[in-house]
Amino acid sequence: DAKTTQPPSMDCAEGRAANLPCNHSTISGNEYVYWYRQIHSQGPQYIIHGLKNNETNEMASLIITEDRKSSTLILPHATLRDTAVYYCIGEDMGRRALTFGSGTRLQVQP
Amino acid sequence: DGGITQSPKYLFRKEGQNVTLSCEQNLNHDAMYWYRQDPGQGLRLIYYSQIVNDFQKGDIAEGYSVSREKKESFPLTVTSAQKNPTAFYLCASSTQIGNTIYFGEGSWLTVV
């Protein structure tokens, strides 16, 4: 399974882009990278996932490096409501159940 | 509305008592999961089920039990054998194992 490494915390100014990095150097060729976020005391919310190509949806963009060893989640215009813990997860192909690490605590500052 | 419903939201139990957390989904998902979260920590997988009448242990299954008699339901029992049961418990489901997981709102269990 792909182990992921994220910085424990980041700050971002409101209205600016938030770029959250994730290293997943052990990811295999057929394992997806998923991003979720969790606002305090709520269930995690799915954001986006990808395999090789960059992905974009209404919430965020996901940039995956060509060697697939790292990725960046981009929130283009962060708001105060984006303050949360963001989890980068590599799919566990053996078990096929997502394993969550400690994530990055993003604090959006007014 | 389609979704995942966990109940109760808050639960208090005395030490030594078994307690069952409910999880129901009306998304017609085959796979269901239980995670545990301790304060300031990530989520840890307790049990998961790919299909009715089938389930597998996750990383921290000791002291927990599950059943999957119906597609819609995946109850979790926290037994007295679980040494530190106080935690936030999250149920999730996906169309099938390996697909995007969607979570319920969680249940807080406090054992005193």
Image: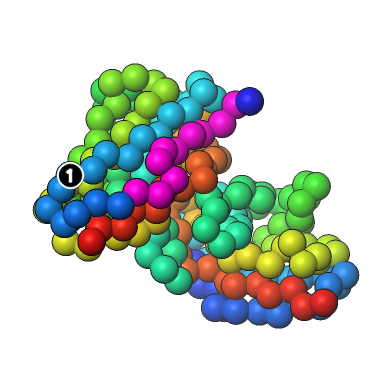
Asked whether residue A27 is in view, the answer is: yes
Q: Residue at x 25, y 58 (%)?
A: B111
Asked whether residue B48 is in view, the answer is: no
In the rendered view, would you say A10 is above or below B33?
Answer: below
Left/right of residue B109 with respect to residue A37 in the rendered view: left
- The location of residue B18, given as percent across then percent down, is 17, 44
- Which quarter of the rendered picture does the N terminus of chain B lie within? top right
Left/right of residue A15 with respect to residue B44 in the rendered view: right
- The location of residue A40, given as percent across then percent down, is 56, 62
**What is the secondary structure assignment of the residue under circle 1?**
loop
**Magenta segment includes A38:** no
- Which quarter of the rendered picture does the C terminus of chain B lie within? bottom left
Judge the density around disc 1: few (<14), some (14-19), many (≥20) Cα neighbours within 10 Å. some
Magenta region, main secondary structure: strand
**Magenta segment includes B5:** yes
- Chain part drawn in magenta: B2-11
Q: Quadrant of residue A79?
A: bottom right
Which of A8 and B5 lies nearest the eye of the viewer?
B5
Which chain is indicated by disc 1? B
Which of A76 and A72 lies nearest the eye of the viewer?
A76
Which of B11 and A80 lies nearest the eye of the viewer?
B11
Q: Residue at label 1?
A: B18
Q: Residue at x 16, y 57 (%)?
A: B15
